[in-house]
Amino acid sequence: MNAEALGIDLERITDKQRETLGIGLRVGSAFKVEATGEILSIFFDFTKLVGGRYFPISFDQIIPEFGATANDLVETGKLTEIDLSDYLDIPYPLKLSASPGAVYEDLPVSQIDYNH
């Protein structure tokens, strides 16, 4: 339902892309280049959600056109992290259940406990 609301055609993306985008809606981040306002996806490809460019690298690898790692760019304020859940207007909060009889409307919004 979120895909349709966000203009994403699920028939045109792979199962892996669907999984990545779904996880991204809850815990994903993109990055804004402070000098230009451009949005970057690093490591995970969230361009279908936020546009911009994708760099399939880890955060400790140098992005050649910036001459530094993503970690260094964030630390120096040249990139600002953007939580996708704050950046996007997600009309249907993520709700997860292992119960085959679960009814979406009856489930609470999923919570993440980062301490476990």
Image (cartoon, rainbow, N blue to C red):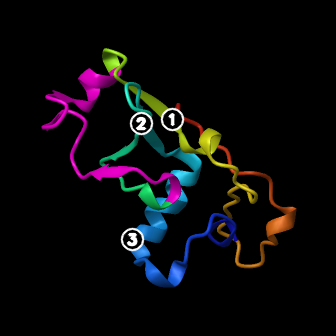
Per the rendering, the mark at residue 82 is: 1
Where is 1 relative to 11, above or below? above
Identify which amino acid the numbered label 3 is placed on.
Answer: Lys
Instruction: Look at mark 3 in the image and give the residue it sits on.
Output: 16
Residue 38: % across, % down: 41, 39
Q: Which is more toward the observer, 17 or 12?
A: 12
Residue 54 on the magenta span: yes
Image side of residue 57 versus residue 107, left or right = left
Identify which amino acid the numbered label 2 is placed on.
Answer: Phe
Residue 33: % across, % down: 38, 31
Tag 1 near tag 3, CB within 8 Å: no
Q: Which residues are magenta?
A: 49-74
Tag 1 near tag 2, CB within 8 Å: yes
Residue 9: % across, % down: 55, 77
Q: CA distance from mark 2 to mark 3?
A: 22 Å
Image side of residue 32 versus residue 106, left or right = left
Indicate which disc, 1 or 2, sits on the residue closer to the N terminus.
Answer: 2
Instruction: Look at mark 2 in the image and give the residue it sits on.
Output: 31
Q: Give the residue displayed 50% in from the left and 52% down from the top.
A: 50
Q: Which is more toward the observer, 114 or 38?
A: 38
Q: Secondary structure at mark 2?
A: strand
Q: Give the residue displayed 31% in from the left and 52% down from the top.
A: 54
Residue 71 quadrant? top left
Q: Secondary structure at mark 3?
A: helix
Residue 92 on the magenta span: no
Q: Secondary structure at mark 1?
A: strand
Where is 8 relative to 55, above or below? below
- Nearer to us of marks 2 and 3 is 2
Q: CA distance from mark 1 to mark 2?
A: 6 Å
